[in-house]
């Protein structure tokens, strides 16, 4: 079992920055992949990107490339989503998720944190 708790959401003006945090706890997750997802109003949940806990390799969706950065703090069991140059279209509930690196199914989810970008 892996527990994920997101924090750091809030209201920010367009062009601003925000860093979301995800506290990871539970069973050994060295072989896990930690991902960030978001669900914009009236849209389906979509991937933002992910990071391999082991090795730190990252991948991003096109919408996140160049503006969002995912990182991890292995010692403190934290994953971060640094967002810059935010746009109103980034308004969404952001979720942290985890899956085994040997699986494609995201088995564990946090409750999400709201990010609102005003114009």
Image (cartoon, rainbow, N blue to C red):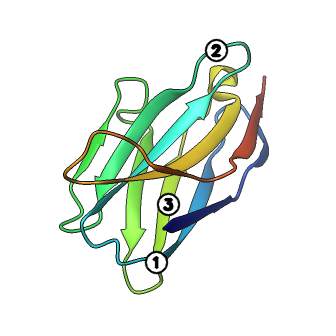
- Looking at the image, the residue that sits furthest to the top is 42
Q: Is residue 80 above or below residue 118?
A: below
Secondary structure, mark 3, is strand
- Looking at the image, the residue that sits furthest to the front is 1
Q: Residue 77: give its label.
A: 1
Q: Residue at x 23, y 54 (%)?
A: 101
Q: Position of residue 107 (x, y in %)?
A: 44, 48
Residue 34 image-quadrant placement? bottom left
Q: Is residue 5 above or below residue 118?
A: below
Q: Which residue is mark 2?
A: 43
Secondary structure, mark 1, is loop
Contact? badges 3 and 2 (CB < 8 Å): no
Q: Residues within 10 Å of mark 3 (few under 14, many from 20)?
A: many
Q: Residues within 10 Å of mark 1 (few under 14, many from 20)?
A: few
Residue 105 image-quadrant placement? top left
Q: Residue 115: give its label.
A: none
Q: Which residue is mark 3?
A: 80
Give the total of numbered labels: 3
| Distance from the alpha carbon under mark 1 to that under mark 3 | 10 Å
Q: Residues within 10 Å of mark 2 (few under 14, many from 20)?
A: few
Q: Position of residue 98 (x, y in %)?
A: 42, 54
Q: Residue at x 29, y 66 (%)?
A: 53
Contact? badges 1 and 3 (CB < 8 Å): no
Q: Position of residue 92 (x, y in %)?
A: 69, 31
């Amino acid at each position: 079992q892996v527990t994920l708790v997101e924090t750091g959401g809030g209201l920010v003006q367009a062009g601003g920055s925000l860093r979301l945090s995800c506290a990871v706890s539970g069973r050994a997750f060295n072989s896990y992949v930690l991902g960030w997802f978001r669900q914009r109003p009236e849209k389906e949940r979509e991937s933002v990107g992910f990071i391999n806990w082991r090795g730190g390799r990252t991948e991003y969706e096109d919408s996140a490339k160049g503006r969002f950065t995912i990182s991890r703090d292995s010692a403190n069991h934290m994953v971060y989503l640094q967002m810059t140059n935010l746009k109103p279209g980034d308004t969404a509930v952001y979720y942290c998720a985890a899956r085994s690196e040997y699986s494609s199914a995201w088995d564990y989810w946090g409750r999400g944190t709201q990010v609102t970008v005003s114009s």
